[in-house]
Image (tube, rainbow, N blue to C red):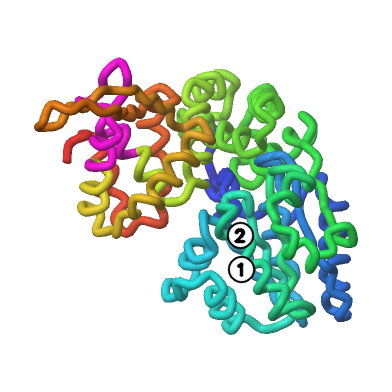
Amino acid sequence: MGKILSLIPLSSNPEIYTPVKLIQRDAELRQLEDVYSRVQRGNVPSVAAVSGPKSMGKTVTIRHFIKTVQARESKVSCLYVRCKSTFRETFKEIYPKVPREQTRVIDYVIKKQSLPLLVFLDDIHNVADRWLNLPIKHLYDSYKGEVLPIFMTNIPFRSLETRFAPEVLSRMSWSLGVFINFPSYSFNDIYQILKQRAEEALDPGSWEEKALEECARYGAQSRELRAAIDLLADACNFKPGEPLKLEHVNAALETAGIRTISHDLENLPLHSRLFLASLFIASHDQSTPKGVNLRDVETVYLKVCEKLSLTPKQYHALYRLRKDLETQDYVKTQTIPRTIIDSMGKKSRGSTTYLSLHLDTEVVHNALNQCEWSDLYEPEKLRMLLKYAIL
């Protein structure tokens, strides 16, 4: 009979589990070591960036590299952060008392580190353009030669370059930078990674090879290693105590898509997720064929924030947040013109905006429920609101 020895190796979250040995990432580790050596010698690159397809080992490789550096006597410090919509939101998860001004955030954080410093800015594409250039410019003007920001992103290097203003690019000397590309894993790569995880998590020989192959095939087709690891974990938990079989994987495949969407939602800023949750709650009993009136969604959002003891976003920030959700295909918007008649009988033109979820309502509900909500003080309170859709 099979037995799960430890659930930790079955976690796809690199903050929970980072393998001691990485598969098919030796070349990228050597490039990171080269950057580290250059900084150690005082030959700091002008800019460094890491890019590659989503969920193909960038974060786990970086965290493995940082652990390796910290385990030896190191003269260079490393700081890893996952970016939110602003630098203040990004660093607030590590240092709750960061100041409001974006440049002062940089000063505050760096004063708490030893120099020289490598700052790994994961998912840098999450930072809104209007909040990106000022702190990066300040970083180069005040700490060049002491701090090297390493931009990590899913978008191509050329697309990342266009995010920066000309005055920032002039400081970066972009053409002289170090660019590390992570190619996609092959089916065989994903299979070997899953086998490594199974050997660490399960009793020896307590799985069918076909089961691992099906998980690897799903990861290769979806082009997401994380999806393959999550599928393996779900299949192992399908009938605990039994050897892992292909039938368990096929059963777990029925809900695999929801887990993937949940991971995508976790990368959104907190209030973006809360706005989606508010739209789901408002849709529960206020939905029309057109969707839900934007004002009703905003009212629910304010009530959700009140229930969770959070300060809601102001109008302009909420507008940008909604536009970002539209761009990322989480929300659909329909604006319908209407005629407004005032008390004097005078007519004027107006409009009403309706919102609807781009995905099936039940899928969004399940995905929000599976989110970790680690940035909420009382996540269970929100889950209860989602469960009953009543405020």
Alpha carbon distance from label 2 to label 1: 6 Å
Q: Amino acid at mark 1?
A: Pro
**Which residue corresponds to the image point at 40% horizontal and 30% vertical from the top-left?**
364
- Numbered label attached to residue 115: none
**Percent x, y for residue 372?**
42, 48
Give the side of residue 208 with respect to residue 22, left or right: left
Quarter of the image with the N terminus in it: top right
- Closer to the camera in the image, 120 or 45: 45
Q: In the picture shown, does residue 144 fall above or below 251?
A: below
Q: Which residue is mark 1?
A: 135
Q: Which residues are magenta?
A: 277-299
Q: Is residue 74 visible?
A: no
Residue 159 forms part of the magenta stretch: no
Task: Please state which of residues 20 and 326 is positioned toward the viewer in this rendering.
Answer: 326
Where residue 211 sits in the image (x, y, percent)?
A: 64, 25
Residue at left offset 52%, top offset 59%: 86
Q: Are marks 2 and 1 in contact (CB under 8 Å)?
A: yes
Closer to the camera, 210 or 152?
152
Camera sees residue 345: yes
> Of the residues shown, which amino acid type is indicated by label 2?
Leu
Instruction: Please give left or right for residue 347 compared with residue 247 in the image.
Output: left
Q: Which residue is mark 2?
A: 132
**Residue drawn where x is 23% and y is 35% of the image:** 296
Residue name at image x 28 percent, y 44 percent: 301
Crowding near the residue tagged with mark 2, few <14, some 14–19, many ≥20 C-alpha atoms within 10 Å: many
Up-down: is 373 above or below 350?
below
Q: Is residue 350 left or right of residue 148?
A: left
Whether residue 204 is situated above or below residue 148 in the rendered picture: above
Per the image, label 1 sits on a secondary structure element best described as helix
